Image: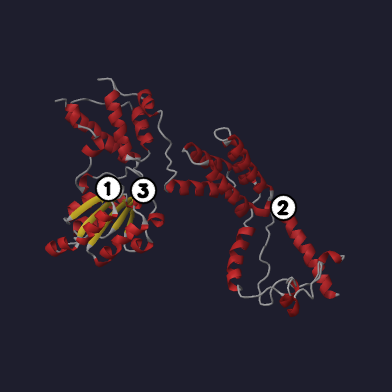
Amino acid sequence: MDPRSDIFPLADRLRPQQLSEFIGQEHLTGRQKVIQALAQGRNLASMILWGPPGTGKTTLARILVREAGYPSTEFSATVSGIAEIKKMMAGAKTPRLGTKQPLALFVDEIHHFNRSVQDAFLPYVERGDVILLGTTTENPAYKINRALLSRLKILELFPLQPADLRRILEKALAFIRDRARVELRFTPEAEAMVIGTSSGDGRRLLNLVEIVFQTAEPGKPVDEAAVLDIIQNKVAGYDRTGDDRYQFISALHKSVRNSDVDAALFWLYRMLQGGEDPLYILRRLVRMAVEDIGLADPDALRVCLNAKEAYEFLGSPEGDLFLGEAAVYLALAPKSNALYVADGKLKKLAEKYKMLPVPLAIVNPDNFIAAGKGAGREYVYAHDLPEKTSLLQTLPDGVREKDFYQPGSMGFEKHIRERMAYWKKIKDELKKK
C-alpha cells in the first residue's frame, strides 16, 4: 500500500482531538479563558462560535463537548431539515434523565437555517434540555433570531496569526515525513508565500500543502515559483454573500467620508476584484453623495448617477473606471451631513406631529366642504409680491421646532447659508411693516 494514500485529506488527518493540541485563538483557549474554563469545569453553556473559515470553529466545538463529557449529537444546517430537528428535539430529554446532563447539540453552519427553523431550538434551549453549540461564518446579529441569540454566548474567532499558521505548517510537514516517509521542504520565500496566501485560514494552508506535496519534485525544496504556479488562479479573499460585503462597503463609505482617496479606491477595487456587483457599489456611492456631501456639492449626486448610467452602457471591465471616478470625486468633495441630520430630525417630528392638519390658508378649496371651512381664503400668492415671499403661515400652529436644516460652511452650502439669510432678512422687514 502506498503510504501517501494514508495522509489525505490533511485538514481532517491533522484535526486536533484535545484542547492541548489546538493552535490559535488564545483569547478563548488560553489559560483561565472561557473555553478552558468550560472544559475544565465540565459545565457547558449554549453558544455560537463565529469566525472566518478555517479558524477552528468546528474543531473547538467538538473538543469542548468531548472534554466536558456531555452526551452529544451533531448535524449540518446545509443538509439537515426541520423534520430531523423536530425528531431530535422530541427525544432531547432522554439523555438528561439518564445522565443528569442535557444533550449537547452541535449545529455546523447554523446561519443556513431560516428563522422559523431556528425558532424550533428556542424552547429546548430555554428549558436547558439542549446545550446548543452553533458555528457560523456570518455575523450572528444579522443571521440568528434575536430571541435565540439572547440565550447564547457569542465567541468570536479571528483569522489565524502567521505564527499559528507556521506551527500548523510544521505539523503538516512532520506528519508527511512520518506517514509518507517523504521530506517536503519549502524555501523561506515559498514558506512565507504559503502562509501569506492562506490569509489566516488553516484549512486553506493544509489544502495548499496537499497540492504542493502531489506536484513537488522529490528531494528538491519547493520554491516561490512553484507555489505561485499553484495559486495563480486563486480567487480574491472576498465573500459577496457574507459579512465581508458589509465590512468592505462600510470601509469604502467611511474612507470617502474621511476624504481619503487612497483608502476609498483600495476598498472599491478589493470589492470589484472579489466579484462584487458594481451596481451594488454604485447604489452606496449614490447614498454617500447625499448623506456625507449633500448640498455642499450638488454635482456629487450627478457624478454618481452619470457613473451608473455609463456603467450600464459599457459594463465590466471597461465600466469599472466610472466607479473609480465617482469614488475619487466623492472623497475629494466638500463634506456636509446637514441633510442627513435634518432627515433624522424630521422623521421624529413627522411622527410627533402626525395628527396636526394642514393650515387652512394653504388647503385647496377644491370642494364645497373645504371651501365652507375657509380653505384657501387667506392664501397669498408669493409671485404677486415684489419680495416674492410673504408672512403666510405654512407650518401647523402646534409645531414649535424651527431650523430643521442647518447648512454647513463648506462648498455650495456657504451660498445656501447666504440664501437662507437673505430670505430671513426679507421676512423680518415684512414683519416690521
- Identify which residue is drawn at 30% across, 34% down: 207
Q: Nearer the viewer, residue 76 or 204?
A: 76
In the visual, does 69 lie left or right of 382? left
- Which percent across, then down, holds residue 374? 76, 78
| Amino acid type shown at disc 2 | Phe
- Identify which residue is drawn at 38% across, 34% down: 197
- Which percent across, then down, holds residue 301? 65, 48
- Which percent across, then down, holds residue 337? 62, 57
Q: Nearer the viewer, residue 86 or 341?
A: 86
Which disc, if any, is residue 137? Answer: 3
Q: Secondary structure at mark 1?
A: helix
Which disc, if any, is residue 412? Answer: 2
Q: Secondary structure at mark 2?
A: loop
Question: Is residue 32 visible to the viewer in this orientation of the structure?
Answer: no
- Which percent across, then down, holds residue 284? 55, 48
| Amino acid type shown at disc 1 | Thr
Tell me where residue 23 sits by quadrant.
top left
User: Answer yes or no: do the residues labelled 3 and 1 have beta carbons within 8 Å?
Assistant: no
* Cα distance between the residues tagged 2 and 3: 44 Å
User: Answer yes or no: do the residues labelled 2 and 1 have beta carbons within 8 Å?
Assistant: no
Please identify, in this view, whether the residue under mark 2 or under mark 3 is nearer the observer. Answer: 3
Residue behind mark 1: 58
Instruction: Pick whichever of labels 3 and 1 is earlier in the sequence.
Output: 1
- Identify which residue is drawn at 38% across, 29% down: 231
Please identify, in this view, whether the residue under mark 2 or under mark 1 is nearer the observer. Answer: 1
